Image (cartoon, helix red, strand yellow):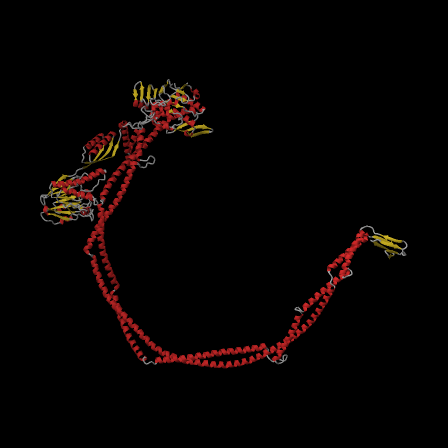
Amino acid sequence: MPRFLHTADWQIGRQYVQFPPEDGALLAEARLEAVATLARLATEHAVDAVLVAGDVFDAQAVSARTIRRLFAQLSGYAGPWLMIPGNHDAALAESVWTSAMRIGALPPNVHLALEPAVLDFASLGFVALAAPLTQRHTYNDLTEWFDAAQTQPGLLRIGLAHGCVQGLLDEAIDSPNPIGADRARSARLDYLALGDWHGCRQVDERTWYSGTPEADRFRDNDPGFALLVDIEASGRAPVVTRIETGRFRWRTREAVVSVASDVERIAGELAGVQASDVLSLQVSGQVDLPGLVRLRDAIGLAEAGARHLQADLSALRLVPTAEDIAELDADGYLGELIAELRDAQSAKGDAAAAAVAAQALELLATFLLEGRTAVADP
Amino acid sequence: MRLQRLKVEQLRQFRAPFEVDGIAPGLNLFVGPNEAGKSTLVRAIRAAFFERHRSSTVEDLRPWGDPSAAPAVELDFTIGDVAYRLRKSFLQRKRCELKSVSRALDGEEAEQHLAALLGFTFAGKGSSRPELWGIPGLLWIEQGQAHELEAPVHNATDHLRKALEASVGEVASTQGDALITKVRAERDLLLTPSTDKPKGELKRAIDDQQALQAQLVDLDARIEGYRLQVDQLAALKAEHAAALAERPWEGLRTRQQAAEQALSASDALLRALEAEVSSLGRVEQRLALVEQQLAGFEDARRALARREAGVSEAEQRLEAATAIEDRRVDEHAKAQAACVVTAADLERARQGDLRRELALRAADADARVRELDALLQRAAEAQSRIEQLHQRAAATVIDAVDVERLRKLAAALEALQLRRDVAATRIRFELADSAAVTLDGEAVDGSGERLVTMPTTIDVPGVGRFEVVPGGDALGTLARDEADTRAAFEALLRRCGVADLAQAQGRMAEHRQATQDGLQAATTLASLAPKGVDALKADRAAQIVRGEDARARVAMLGGDADGQDESLPLSEAEARHLAARTQADTIGAQLAEARQARLVAREQHEAALREREAARARLDAPERQTQEAEAGRQLLASRAERDSLRASIAARREAVERTQRDLLEQSVERYRRSADVALQGHRERESQITRLGGSLEEAGAQGFEETRAALAVRLEATERRRRELDLRAKALDLLLERLEARRRELTRRLRAPLQSRIDHYMRLLFPKAALEIGDDLLPGLLTRPAGPGDETGAVAELSHGAREQMGVLVRLAYADLLKDAGRPTLLILDDALVHSDLQRLERMKRVLFDAAQRHQVLLFTCHPSAWQDIGVAPRAIARS
């Protein structure tokens, strides 16, 4: 009863533009660690082969060091690693793969299909039909030839492809690298291991996207898994199990503050962040001064607790109350100015001017708060 | 505020305690000479309020040379209804106590309370500075500083605003100024103060972003290049594989070879053609030779005929030449004979001519002889006359000098006689006829007169003798002179051989005539015989010989020298002979010519004969016949060969043309080149693939895309930072602008009440003038009546004295406002208004007096007399 570990979209070499460089470096490092995790899992679950359905690398021109480091992660599993190039690392005339081969980084147990081929693993009871991408983008279904491919009867037919299953995903309409929606059936495949979609997703009984083993974006589409595939025999439906591989949980939170308790709710959520969280927080609405202070404090704490917290308060407007103004000793014309800025920040029309006003108001409040707690030397 | 008591101790010159008590609520005048300590008291008040008791920078308070001193000030004052006592000591004993009925404060707390009460600020560190003095800094005028207003007002503005908020009915901001300072500081970290240009962090962020952007663009270009190369490599590989499968150059080579074969067949054809063309050339050459040979034979025949004609022509020319020669010989002989005749005639003519010539010569010689004879005759005559004249001249010769002396002596004698006559005694007598009187023996008669110079005896017969003796010595002298002269005269006459002067003169004239005539005769002779008579004689002899010679030659010639001559005149004879000889010469030349012509003609005739013989010999040669026949035969054979070759060549040429050689050659070249190109392209592609592979390998090893991703991360971070800083800068700018606008607005509102107080004091100082207060709460323009209209000018441009007055006045106005606002006011004037003239000082006293109704005023001066009329008793400051 052959057993496989299906994974894809490792995207080694990816950098995280939206994060501060130190956080980004750690997240990039996590991708390599995820591969080591996969190797460990493969060994633990005693799989017959690991199916890697494309996009092993994020780019073609990556450094030799990165290439070597990746293949070093595979050492935890001695069985065969079946790999096909995806759109990011397509098997071009000169590619990351030719580089890897040139520097001799490919371990012998990596079975790399740089062109469409049937990989024969008769001793393990299966053959693999590999449909690598040899161009960055193609508008032909590279798996079409699966239908006509003859293989030894009795051996499992396992497909490996990278692209968009047609008609499945809204975004996939007219997208490049199409894959026929019915390919597993038409090609009499026992399992079709797909890559490209970063979330874990089942397409049909025998067709799955494993998703990326380590999340790399805030899109909430269930990344961070590998699939354990058990196939009892040729023609039998595979038994697919999701195994969590991701180290970091990427989440987005969009919150609207309208009443004081909203701030408390957000603060409560932020209090629960963990070291594995990569969080994007966007707060909009209106907040009074204590609310803003509370929110800022909560964000400050959460930033320390989470792997990364990306808080965007640009849509949140500070609206100081009369009490706030009194509390800040903002008497005389300061009080008037606060009122003026409060109105200006929500003025319609010039969004940039409104943002400047909002920032000015916050700064004013901040300075006043500082002045209240510290004795400033004028 | 009212200060009641002031006590200082161990402070500068006040080493011992010094106290001023009972300070009045209104005006107080403190007087004292220089160094008395007025300024020290003012300093003490300032120190008590402004200086921190802990300050170590108040060394100036210490009395000279007293390191252990603890300068102390004690003040009693009331603010509102609250009485305070402030005790402050410095340096060695640092204390501060502020006591009121309700509370006692001390140290820092006491100082802060004090600052709040009066409206100033303490220095964080070190000694107090004017910027911190606030309201007291304005109202307490330091010595000579009354005219300075701008800085004190500026330093007090914040305190004034706060202090005056009640009176202006506006809410000032307690934190406003601190906030503005803070906002400005923050803003100026990011933007330049004046130009709003980014600076500091913001500028760094912008620079970083631009630098990274540039790097990214560069990298993107390289990545794009890399990708293009990858695609190029793929395309090349595909082409390479296709080329390997098709091997197009081989097909091209095959076609090239086929074309080459066709071309070589055509080549063979062409070579045959060329062989025939060359044969044709040879045949045509031979034909030309044969034709030339035949023409040679024909030429020889024609040459003989030409020679025959030449011979007969030469014969004719010879005969003609001979005839001409003969005629010329004849003519020449005749001419020679004529020439002989004329030569004889000429000889005769010449002899005749000579004879006549000689006859003429003889006649001429005879005539000459006769002529010479006549001349000789006349010459002899002249000669004899000359000799005669010479003789006469010699006979009459007399010295001209002697004649002259004679003449002079005669004249002298005459003169002497004359003088003697005058001096002589005159004896006149008239004698009767009868009387025979003798005088010196000489008888006299009749009447007459005698002059006597010597004693003369008159004898009168009858009477006796009278002797007359002339009187005087002169007569005697004269008589001697006369005698001497006469003696000389007569001696000379004798020497000259003449009797008297006339004779002498006659002889001299005669001699001259003879000499002259002799010369004339010599001249005549010279003209007759210039070379002398002998020459004439010689000439005569020569002429005789000439004449005889001529006659002798005539005789020799024979004939009669004088007879008739039958000969022709010489000139005619000569002309005739010349003509005859010329004729003979001409004909002689013609003869020579004719002879020469005949010789030439004979030679030509002989040559023509020889040529004719030669031509005939050639034509008659025995082998010529066979040669000519052979040539004729060859001519026919060659012509036949030539025609056949021409036909063959035309046929072959057509065949060659049919093969289209140029097209074949082009085809060969085209296929060859195509094959080369195909193969070359193939090899080039191969090497290009290798090259490109290498280049990509190298580029790939650099990890461009990974680098780019890392760069993008940094760029994004920088951009984020730049956006944040930009927003912050804009917000700070906005905040600053708004805050300052509002503060300006507030200040502006303070202006009205201040202006009303100023107007009040201005009425006291310059009844008709107006001082305008600006938005900065400082006096701006002063308008006052001057002449016909008003004049307006800035206070800053006024004289020192006027500015001083304005300074005091504005401070009083501020004090009024503060008073109205319930704030403590105390005015201190330390020797203010020293620059004011008497009239102005009078008015200022009015002003001060008026102000003192509302405020306590401490006035320190060293000119007590100037303030006598201020209405209060002066208090002298004197150290105990």
Give the quadrant of the C terminus of chain A. top left
Relative to A207, is B40 on the left or the right? right
Relative to B398, is B132 on the left or the right? left
Q: Position of residue A331 (x, y in %)?
A: 30, 27
Relative to B324, is B463 on the left or the right? right
Q: Is residue A9 above or below residue B489?
A: above
> Residue A244 occupies which quadrant of the picture?
top left
Q: Residue at x 18, y 35 (%)?
A: A275
Q: Is residue A20 above or below residue B854?
A: below
Query: Relative to the observer, which residue lies in front, A33 or A202?
Result: A33
Q: Is residue B765 visible?
A: yes
Query: Relative to the observer, which residue lies in front, B46 or B139?
Result: B46
Q: Position of residue B849 (x, y in %)?
A: 41, 21
> Residue B292 occupies which quadrant of the picture?
bottom left
Q: How many marks?
A: 0
Q: Residue at x 37, y 78 (%)?
A: B303
Query: Relative to the observer, which residue lies in front, B171 or B510?
Result: B510
Give the quadrant of the N terminus of chain A. top left
> Residue B847 occupies which quadrant of the picture?
top left
Q: Position of residue A16 (x, y in %)?
A: 22, 40
Q: Is residue B414 visible?
A: no
Q: Position of residue B215 (x, y in %)?
A: 26, 43
Q: Is residue A141 above or below residue B803?
A: below
